[in-house]
Image (spheres, rainbow, N blue to C red):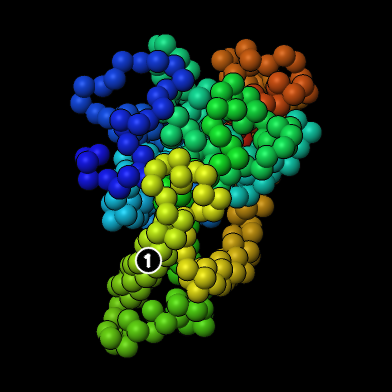
Amino acid sequence: MSSTLVPYASTPERARGRFIAEPESSTRNCFQRDRDRIIHATAFRRLIHKTQVFVYHEGDHYRTRLTHSLEVSQIARSIARVLGLNEDLSEALALAHDLGHPPFGHAGEDELSKRMGPYDGFDHNAQALRVVTRLEHRYADFDGLNLTWETLEGLVKHNGPLPAGDEQDLPAALRAFENLDQLELELHPSLEAQVAALADDIAYNNHDIDDGLRAGLFSVEDLLNVPLVGEVFSDVMKTYPGLEMSRLIHESIRRLISSMVDDALETSRAAIARFGVRSPEDVRRCGAPLIAFSESMKQNDSALKHFLNERMYHHYKVNRMMSQARRVVADLFDLFLNEPGTLPTEWRAQCDGPVTPQTARVACDFIAGMTDRFALEEHKRLFSLEKGI
């Protein structure tokens, strides 16, 4: 496979290895092995009951973190393949990018960040690193998944280089990783990581259109004034008069995704040529991201984000669900922080007493790993007298 890749792609032959040495697989290259370890991880399996906008019981057809990650993976592989990049690495990063998210989407993260404010905070990207380097307990020889340098680098720099300067400015979950200084935080990540990040943006926005329409939070007519989105929906309705709603939505969204992917391919090819990159090291040191939208597509993407923010993420129905979710997270965190004896045995053993930074981090890790369903059930067990002990 490596012989078909461009010179600036990441390849297993040039991979920097794992921080804990292991024998190589006889059937899979190192990035394929990373992907498989991520898929088999407990944290990945839990994504099926973690949601982004809707709480899990709202309906069977809305996206979960798992279905979103699979959709990101498909888009990332497609882009990587056309650009001659390493599909396996892009796929691994796409599948891993949401592993650090707590239950209840952004509401859960906001509340957990608030509660962890006095205790070095919470960041879902940093938590993903914590999951794959410490919290997964599957292997006899090490904690975490012992992923390759390239996968860890892409996971940490999910949104680009981290600001240089005082290490204390970084999230605590990053600082806790003993090999963090070896991930070249000030440099850009590989093109494969950049592809996964852009694929996340493409999948997220387009599939939120689908979920928002299905939930009745806005209508197709509301979308007609959104740049590009309105044009695509109008064209589909003109081409297929009277098309049933489910087909109209799917046909429009697949065209939107294709438009964004085509734009990203054209723009990225031009940027790669302009910077004259010849190796993965050139990519990291070129001083700018190379996988990106054109300026016009960035404007379209921004307009869609603005629409979704106003009409979906702050819809009163969503606000009500998220208000409940925040209270669940707040109640659980406060209880575990003040009464660590209420934590399961293996978690309680890591605590050093009530209301300490260590106990706060343990409570944070426990809650962040919960699914929506488990968090709601745990809340009932601990706070509902009718539920019993």
| Up-down relation of residue 360 to residue 108 (above or below) | above
| Up-down relation of residue 66 to residue 300 (above or below) | above
Give coordinates of residue 189: x percent, y percent. 49, 43
Give coordinates of residue 16: x percent, y percent. 41, 27
Determine the residue positioned at 35% across, 84% down. Answer: 235
| Up-down relation of residue 216 to residue 235 (above or below) | above
Q: Nearer the viewer, residue 68 or 126?
A: 126
Determine the residue positioned at 45% across, 29% down. Answer: 149
| Up-down relation of residue 256 to residue 48 (above or below) | below
Q: Quadrant of the C terminus?
A: top right
Q: Quadrant of the N terminus?
A: top left
Mark 1 residue element:
helix
- Tell me which corner region of the image, top left, top right, bottom left or bottom right, holds residue 316: bottom right
Determine the residue positioned at 64% across, 57% down. Answer: 320
Residue 64 visible in the shown view: no
Q: Amino acid at mark 1?
A: Glu
